Amino acid sequence: MVESSQEGKPRERGGGGWGRKRKQEPRLPDARKEQPSIYWRAGIQERGTHTFTPTPPHPRRAKSREPSDSSGPSLSPPLHVPQPPRFVCAPGSADMASPKKGFCRQEITKTIWEVKERYRDLQAVGSGAYGTVCSATDRKSGTKVAIKKLYRPFQSELFAKRAYRELRLLKHMKHENVIGLLDVFTPNVSLDTFNDFYLVMPFMGTDLSKIMKHEKLTEDRIQFLVYQILKGLKYIHSSGIIHRDLKPGNLAVNEDCELKILDFGLARHTDSEMTGYVVTRWYRAPEVILNWMHYTQTVDIWSVGCIMAEMITGRPLFKGNDHLDQLTEIMKVTGTPTQDFVQKLQSQDAKNYIKSLPKVQKKDFAAILKHANPLAVNLLEKMLVLDAEKRVTAAEALAQPYFEALHDPEEENEAEKYDDSFDNMDLPLDEWKRITYKEIINFKPPQSPDSKETAV
């Protein structure tokens, strides 16, 4: 997951100022940096946020990349976070047991963290239902990373399966627009004592939700951000995975305006049975609300359309108060579904509800998205289609005229198929621990050029 920079003569595009080659040192005033986003689980609380404005990058990176001597920009530590307690490294001390050789022990938010010596300056940045996240400095690479510690991952078969799934998905993802794994380790010395593990990921400066709260995005930025979302989705979908929880808060953005798709907590293989209550309501596709059990990857495309429309207008497009109100808000724009669409529904209750609605004509998206680029409106018309079977795929969306200046099939790569054969297994707790331990022991960090600049 290491990216390097390369100097070169910029290429002007239209009236914008984005060159083709990436800048080594993007300028970001110290007063406008933001506390990192906590993006691994829904419901995580954040601390000490302040504003952040990304610098627009180049539309496309150069195809050949050279290692850079630059260590890249660093982000300020979070505000209002107390100084961390001292590290206790092997051989330990009287008041705290000795950690494993090569590890250091520290208490953070009343929890003992035991991490590799290379990770220092841990700062608690958030916690949620399933884990706690800290930022840290990787002394080996000189970069900032994010470390997640799961809460008691082996307290039950359900928790163990969830932890194993998250680890497997993160290990599988190797794309510049999708969060991946830099490192994973356990402080436990053997399988017999194995009880904890830590996930190390790229540190991202903020997320799209916060950016939209603080500023009006320019057309160039919207175009580049949506392009990256769709590139990441094409990769994810090609592996056979549906994300199922795309929303602005799950899209991390750094100071170069580079984006990564986060949080695979709800991700499922396309062959899996689906449930209706996934995806934050405002970005939820109609087929999810109507509880189709076998919906397709285009459920994520609907979410991208909602996010893109919000970037353009500065407010959510469909802001329902509950799932039925959400469906009503959608149909005020898309119009009442056709009889063919209704017949595809598996739920008789959903069919009856649709039939009970008054007939509504489809609205003109251009009237809703006033002053928007007509090519952007045309793309949204193809993404926000009520019938999922008629919605564009990520690959088809990338080829739309709206992305003409960015589209490069060679950079829009696909993934190897993801093996989720374990997902329908009911294994005993000891077996979940064994296969998780094996994944950790066999982990190979991503190869990187001799550079200190990473994807953070």
Image: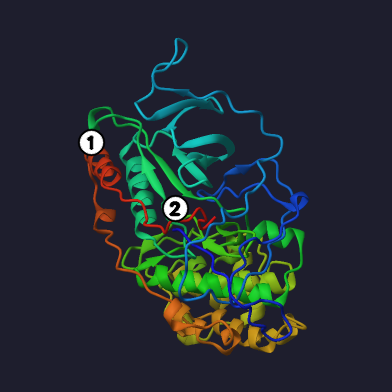
Q: Amino acid at mark 1?
A: Asp
Q: Position of residue 215 (x, y in %)?
A: 76, 63
**Camera-side residue of 311 and 399:** 399
- Where is mark 2, residue-wise? 265
For the point 33% across and 36% down, the residue is 156
389 relative to 193 in the view: left or right: right
Residue 363: image quadrant is: bottom right
Number of dots carrying numbers:
2
Q: Earlier in the sequence, mark 2 or mark 1?
A: 2
Quick one: label 2, few (<14), some, or many (20+) residues within 10 Å? some
Q: Report the disc number at residue 447.
A: none
- Where is mark 1, residue-wise? 430
**Above or below for 96 versus 58:** above
Q: Position of residue 197 (x, y in %)?
A: 37, 37
273 relative to 394 in the view: left or right: left
Is the N terminus in the top left, top right, bottom left or bottom right quadrant? Answer: bottom left
**Camera-side residue of 381 and 219:** 219
For the point 56% across and 34% down, the residue is 121
SS for dot 1: helix
Instruction: Please say whether residue 105 is visible from this viewpoint.
Output: yes
275 relative to 368 in the view: left or right: left
For the point 51% across and 75% down, the residue is 62
**Camera-side residue of 317 and 456:** 456
**Above or below for 354 versus 146:** below
Q: Position of residue 299 (x, y in %)?
A: 48, 71
Q: Amino acid at mark 2?
A: Gly
Scheme by which the image is coloured: rainbow
**Above or below for 124 versus 385:** above
SS for dot 2: loop
